[in-house]
């Protein structure tokens, strides 16, 4: 199984500041035939299902604010929120869909400092 | 508008069985792979099954293989998860999720609100 490890487990950032969440996979999730990283990012607020933010490691889902961006390739990935807003308080998960079983990171809890 | 709505959760004794349903609308159900993902109280996300939209192939992690069965009724636009030999560690909110296309190798762009399954005596 591919193990997804996020860091940090929790993060406190001031409003308007940058938040960075890292995700590392135990093996590459880059599919060489199409040069795509099979990596997604989700946001989950209390009592709600996860919401897709980023897919193919760096493609923003329709309707997601452009302050959210994804980067990285192979085994190391980053979700960046360029200017933190109050509504961004949530738990963030990365997920690989390269191999079965599909696996998620343990989650990163983002709070306001 | 894509909509997913789970049902069938509830309290079940250890060793018991339960069938979850996920009614969908807003897209051609038969053309899309679907998955079930669960979340234990206060914990992270765990994928528990997938079914393709092409040939109906099914996939499971070892944690539920042989106990859970995913299926679909394309005529009713409904996804199912039959769960048996339930354990306390199966207690979770169960979400159904829609894939990008017919392949299960996909992110999940749409999720239902979830249904709670509690396994306890």
Image: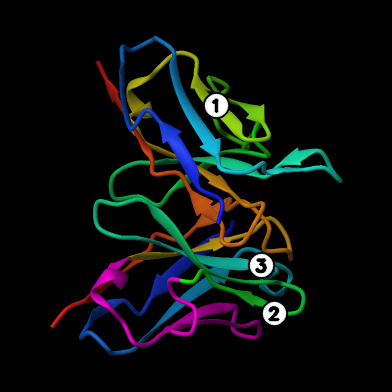
Please state which of the two labelled residues, at mark 1 or mark 3, is closer to the viewer: 1
* Along the viewing direction, whichever of A6 and B117 lies nearer the viewer: A6
In magenta stretch: residue B67: yes
Binning the other alpha carbons within 10 Å of mark 3 as few (below 14), some (14 to 19) or many (20 upward) gives many
Labels 2, 3: one chain: yes
Provide the chain ID for the residue under circle 2. Answer: B
Point out residue A59 in the picture as x, y percentages from the top left corner: 67, 33
* Colour convention of the picture: rainbow
Give the residue pinned by disc 1. A78
Binning the other alpha carbons within 10 Å of mark 1 as few (below 14), some (14 to 19) or many (20 upward) gives many
| Distance between the alpha carbons at the discs numbered 1 and 2 | 34 Å
- The relative height of residue B84 versus residue B105 in the rendered view (above or below) is below
| Distance between the alpha carbons at the discs numbered 2 and 3 | 8 Å
Task: Identify the residue at horizontal 57%, vertical 53% (top origin).
Answer: B108
Numbered mark located on residue B56 in the image: 2
In the rendered view of the protein, which quadrant contains the C terminus of chain B? bottom left
Give the residue pinned by disc 3. B33
Q: Secondary structure at mark 1?
A: strand
Provide the chain ID for the residue under circle 1. Answer: A
Q: Secondary structure at mark 3?
A: loop
The boundaries of the magenta stretch are: B63-92
Labels 1, 2: one chain: no
- The relative height of residue B94 versus residue A25 in the rendered view (above or below) is below
């Amino acid at each position: 199984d591919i193990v997804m490890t996020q860091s940090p487990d929790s993060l406190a950032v001031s409003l308007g500041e940058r938040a960075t969440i890292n995700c590392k996979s135990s093996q590459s999730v880059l599919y060489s035939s199409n040069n795509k990283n099979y990596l997604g990012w989700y946001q989950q607020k209390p009592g709600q299902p996860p919401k897709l933010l980023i897919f193919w490691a760096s493609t923003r889902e329709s309707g997601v604010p452009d302050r959210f961006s994804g980067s990285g390739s192979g085994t190391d990935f980053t979700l960046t929120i360029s200017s933190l807003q109050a509504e961004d308080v949530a738990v963030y998960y990365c997920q690989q869909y390269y191999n079965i079983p599909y696996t998620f990171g343990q989650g990163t809890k983002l709070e306001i400092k | 508008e894509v909509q997913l709505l789970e049902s069938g959760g509830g309290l079940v004794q250890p060793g018991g069985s339960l069938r979850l349903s996920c009614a969908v609308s807003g897209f051609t159900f038969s053309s899309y792979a679907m998955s079930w993902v669960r979340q234990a109280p206060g914990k992270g996300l765990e994928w528990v099954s997938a079914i393709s939209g092409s040939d109906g192939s099914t996939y499971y992690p070892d944690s539920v293989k042989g106990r859970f069965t995913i299926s679909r009724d394309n005529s009713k636009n409904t996804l199912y998860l039959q769960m048996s030999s339930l354990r306390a560690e199966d207690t979770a909110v169960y979400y159904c999720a829609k894939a990008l296309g017919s392949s299960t190798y996909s992110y999940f762009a749409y999720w239902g609100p979830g249904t709670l399954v509690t396994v306890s005596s």
